[in-house]
Structure formats: structure tokens, C-alpha cells
Image: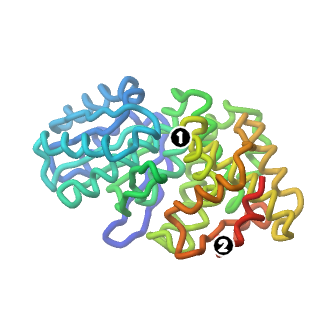
Amino acid sequence: MEKIFVDLGKDSYTIEIAPHSWTGFGKKIRELARGNKAAVITDRTVDSLYGADLEQQLLAQGFQVRRLVMEPGEDHKNLDTYGNMVRACADFGMTRSDLVITLGGGVPGDLGGFAAASFLRGVDFIQVPTTLLAQIDSSVGGKVAVDLPEGKNLVGAFYQPKGVLMDPELLRSLDRRYLHDGLAEVIKCAAFGDPELFAALENFSGDEDILAHAEEISAACCRIKVKVVEEDVRDVGARMVLNFGHTIGHAVERYYHYEKYTHGEGVAIGMVRLTRNTEKMGITQPGTADRIRHLLEKYDIPTEDPISDQHILEGITMDKKKRGNQITLVIVPEIGKSLLKKVDFADLGPYVKG
């Protein structure tokens, strides 16, 4: 079992990573909760696997429970679904001492967290991530949001959970594509912050090795993320390093209306495209882009897309991380290192060239 403390003063919490811990989640949630009502925000796929079980655990701990089930997929992480969820919380009669539990991947985690942040101006919430991407990334750090047609995560807040509960064994229920979706974010973390993890991933034989080492992988990525979140909660400095691959990746996702690629696949395309270009510009050590590409392709994660440079640039104009006429790019000069570079929009072309 791994326990990682996130030191954010009054907003501090603990991430617990423990194989075969699922059956004790109800008791742990009881220990973290103040009230007696729990709204479980999840999607239809995850609800069919784990919703009824978690409800029974919570009922056994004395909670009144309401399962609020959304359709799966990024295209449902929108204001309409958000509105349905907060209205359901109101219908449930929740008060500020009650609790939202987000159960699933990044979509219910992001949307449910934003519902918790805004309903009654803030109720407690606990993250129970069931995908690799959510366990190593989106459940940690307090970024909660929904999408607009104009771009991803444009309406949201910084709002920390009361705790994060992970059972790596739940990853065995994942479709192979969605296991690899999260693995793209693992590779991202390793590329900018953990050369030993990167080398280990290169040496693994395949998915079974990933699942067998899921506790260590999740803990390594969470430690990286926690370190930068503690330094920079609101994503204005050090935390930006977590956006490696995301500036181009979000533009790719948006161009295809979040239908062609998962989030991790978009990030993978962004990492390779940017790093190939920074190699050509002499910023990145030769061979770095190929190492990243080969590792992604080892797990059948896409690394190329014919999207035009112009469409990438148009997508970046809606990026929430831009400041005036500049955006900060995260560049990997060599595996395990990173640098932040502010670039004028007028000068972005060479960085996004396909």
C-alpha cells in the first residue's frame, strides 16, 4: 500500500493506492465524510461494473445514497450534463455537509468535481478513479471542469478532494485501448520527470507487466504530480510541466470533436510532434522524439495525424493556458528533463509543424 500526502495547508489530503482495497472503500469514505448523504457521480459503463457494489458499501456505513449516472465519453462532459447533475444533487436534498463521490475515469471525475465545487458554493468530494489515466493524473491536483464547443475544460475551478482512493486491480476491467490511453500519460510523466520509469516501460514486455506493476507506476506518477501541485496549485508556473504534449494534443482532440482520439492519444501525438520539431530547432537532444515514439508505438498508441498546421494553430488559440498573445510550451530537452518556453502566437509555426 502506498500513501501519498498532498500538502496544501487547509486543503491537504491523502492519496491511498492499495491493491484489493475496493471492498473497504465504503468504510474509508465514512471516515472522510461529515454528512450522511452521498451522491455518486459516475458513467453508465462504470456504474454497471461497480455502482451497485459501492452503493451497498455506503449503505452499510449509514449513508443515504443517490447514484447519478451520465453517458460515457468526453462529448458528454458538457454544461448540459453538469446541469443535470447539480439539479439531481438539489433534488436529493444535499447540504454543505454532504458528499459527492466521483467514480470512474477522467470525465466523471472532472465533471463531478466541478459539480461539487459549485453546488451550494462547494461540498466535499472524494475521487475514486477506476482508469489508469484518472489514477495517475486527473484525480490528483484539484482541476475540475467541463468542456465547451469552443474548447476543452474552459469552465471549471481549482477544487481539492478530501481524499483519493485507488485500487490498481480495478484496471483489469479496462478495455485495452483505455489502458493504453492512461499509459500515454504515464509515458508523458516519465519523459519529463522520471528517466528510470521511462527505461522500465521500455523494458516491460506488454500489458501484463503494466498491470502487475500498476501500484508502483501510479505511485511514481502521483509523486511527480504532487510535487509540482504543491509548488503551483493554480497552474501558473511549475505545474505547467504537466502539460507536455497537451497544447497540440488538445487542438487535435478538438479538431475531431473528441470522437477520433482519446485524451491520451491526443497527448501522444502532441508529444511526438512537438519533440520532433524541437530536435530540429536544436533545443532537444537528437533521438529523444524517436524514443518517445517507439515507446508509445510499443503499446499501439498513435503518434501521427495528418491534421494541418493551420488547424493546430487555430485550436491553440482557444487554449486556456494562453496569456495574452503568448503560450507556454513544455519542452523535453532530454528524457527526464523539461523546460518551459514562452512563445508568441506569431512564432508558433515551427513548433507545431507536421
Residue 109 appears left or right of 208? left
Residue at 65% of width from left, 75% of height from top?
Answer: 344
- Three-letter code for the amino acid on which mark 1 is drawn: Tyr
CB within 8 Å, label 1 to label 2: no
In the rendered image, residue 268, in percent from the top left (x then y), is placed at: 68, 47
Considering the numbered disc 1 on the image, is that residue within a helix, a strand or a loop? loop
Q: Position of residue 17 (x, y in %)?
A: 48, 46
Q: Where, by quadrant of the figure, is residue 105 drawn? A: top left
Q: Residue at x 52, y 66 (%)?
A: 321
Q: Quadrant of residue 312?
A: bottom right
Report how far apart the C-alphas of labels 1 and 2 lie in the structure. 27 Å
From the image, tell me which residue sits under label 2.
340
Spot the residue most to the right: 286
Which disc, if any, is residue 258? 1
Mark 2 is surrounded, within 10 Å at the Cα level, by few (under 14), some (14 to 19) or many (20 or more) other residues, namely some
**Count of marks, rendered view:** 2
